[in-house]
Image: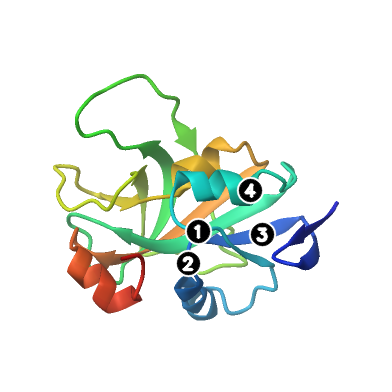
Amino acid sequence: MKICLNGNLFYMEHLILIAEEGERDLIAKYLPNTDWPVLVTGVGGVNIVRALRDVPKDTHVLNIGYAGSANFNIGTVVEVTEVFTNHPNCRFAEPTLKLNPVDDGLFPIADRKAVCYTNSDFVLASDYKDCVFDMELAYIAAMGFAKTSALKLVSDNLSLHAYHELTNGVE
């Protein structure tokens, strides 16, 4: 199926998703041999839904982007295995959103595998360890694509200042 994204016509079999234009550097560094089209979605859940609502559900989407972590070293590449939304002030039932493995034949093997917690705001503190935090992945996974995979580069240890120094990202 062909679809128009950002003014370009693509056959949607595969698609790389990044939240901000600055994350395009991650594709060049970690996925140099891919020719998959790239869609810049914008940051957060509403931007994800708006950007992906017309993408065919049989598309394999790969989200690559920055993420925070309470204890992973900055620069660690994480393959996300499952994703949840993070609600630090309450608990309620939500489905576990499992992700597909990243194809090691096409992409590099990550430093480690971990869970991702998607938040509606930047995480500055958390008791959760051995995981990463982002602002888009749970919404992407909930869209129901045939295959969803994710690689996250740890940009900070829950420090907005460190995130800005590395990424020049969202203010």
Side of 105 relative to 27 (left or right): right
Which quadrant would residue 33 be assigned to in this image?
bottom right
Residue occupied by mark 2: 20
- Among numbered discs 4 and 3, the one appearing first in the sequence: 3
Q: Are marks 2 and 1 in contact (CB under 8 Å)?
A: yes
Taking the spot 76% from the left edge, 55% from the top edge, the residue there is: 13
Question: In the image, what residue type sits under mark 1?
Answer: Gly
Q: In the rendering, at what x and y percent does residue 107 appear?
A: 56, 67
Q: Looking at the image, do the residues carrying marks 3 and 2 touch, with CB atoms under 8 Å apart?
A: no
Q: Residue at x 26, y 69 (%)?
A: 163
The answer to whether residue 90 is visible is yes
User: Exactly how many numbered labels are in the figure?
Assistant: 4
Residue ID for mark 4 = 52
Mark 1 crowdedness (10 Å alpha carbons): few <14, some 14-19, many ≥20? some
Question: For this view, does 21 lie left or right of residue 135?
Answer: right
The x and y percentages for residue 34 are: 65, 73
Mark 4 → mark 1, Cα distance in angstroms: 11 Å
For the point 45% across and 75% down, the residue is 22
Q: Against 95, is 164 above or below?
A: below
Spatial separation of the CA atoms under disc 4 and disc 3: 11 Å
- Residue at the spot of label 3: 15
How far is disc 4 from disc 2 in space, using C-alphas?
Answer: 15 Å
